[in-house]
């Protein structure tokens, strides 16, 4: 009984599909969408690769209780990688309270932190290891 039903419904279903695919039927397969309708969305995979802009790295080192360079310059509103290299035998950090930024490097270590500089301004950076700021370990970050 099931076979008889299938034999009768399959030809009817094929006929409906063929009629819907004809060129004379608006909205059929292969015909343009009706005016005012949205085309179906399709996913074709990831977009073609584009040339990536090189990451801008702003580097500072800590040879003792000072920064080299003493002033860092950052572009306003653009992402950069802040890189701290500790060339001293003690831990050091870069702390900027106004930017909620703090990074620490142990002796011989280089650490990186992606940041986006805020609006233009001048900010104090200092080493937050106890006693280092008092010993003069501070500098500036200039955002322009």
Image (cartoon, grey):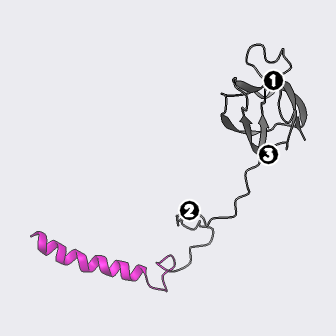
Numbered circle sitting on residue 46: 2
Q: Nearer the viewer, residue 87 or 23?
A: 87
In three-dimensional space, the C-alpha distance between marks 3 and 2, rounded to whole angstroms, equals: 25 Å
Point out the frontmost of discs 2 and 1.
1
- Mark yes or no: residue 124 visible: no
Q: Earlier in the sequence, mark 1 or mark 3?
A: 1
Magenta stretch holds residue 14: yes
The quadrant of the picture occupied by the N terminus is bottom left
Residue lying at 87% horizontally and 28% vertically, measured from the top left: 139
Please tell me whether mark 3 sits on a helix, a strand or a loop. loop
Residue beneath disc 3 = 78
Q: Position of residue 109 (x, y in %)?
A: 65, 34
Q: Which residues are magenta?
A: 1-30
Residue 8 position within the rendered picture, expressed as x and y whole percent measured from the top left: 19, 77
At horizontal 78% and vertical 40% (from top left) the residue drawn is: 59
Task: Please tell me whether mark 1 sits on a helix, a strand or a loop.
Answer: loop
Q: CA distance from mark 1 to mark 3?
A: 29 Å
Give me the residue at 59% from left, 67% from top: 37
Q: Quadrant of residue 58?
A: top right
Give the left or right position of residue 5, taking residue 14 as reference.
left
The quadrant holding residue 127 is: top right
- The tag earlier along the polypeptide, 3 or 2, is 2
Q: Which mark is residue 65?
A: 1
**Left or right position of 69 against 116:** right
Vertical relation: 101 (above or below) 1:
above
Q: Position of residue 74 (x, y in %)?
A: 84, 41
**Residue 2's mark?**
none
């Amino acid at each position: 009984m099931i076979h008889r039903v299938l034999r009768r419904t399959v030809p009817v279903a094929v006929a409906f599909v063929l009629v819907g695919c004809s060129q004379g039927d608006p909205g059929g397969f292969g015909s343009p969408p009706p005016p005012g309708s949205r085309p179906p969305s399709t996913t074709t995979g990831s977009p073609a690769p584009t040339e990536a802009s090189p990451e801008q790295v702003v580097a500072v080192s800590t040879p003792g209780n000072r920064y080299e360079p003493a002033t860092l310059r950052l572009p306003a509103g653009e992402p950069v990688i802040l890189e701290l290299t500790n060339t001293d035998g003690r831990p050091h950090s870069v702390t900027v309270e106004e930017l909620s930024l703090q990074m620490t490097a142990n002796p011989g270590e280089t650490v990186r932190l992606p940041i986006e500089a805020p609006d233009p301004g001048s900010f104090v950076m200092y080493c937050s290891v106890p006693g280092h700021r008092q010993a003069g370990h501070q500098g500036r970050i200039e955002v322009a």
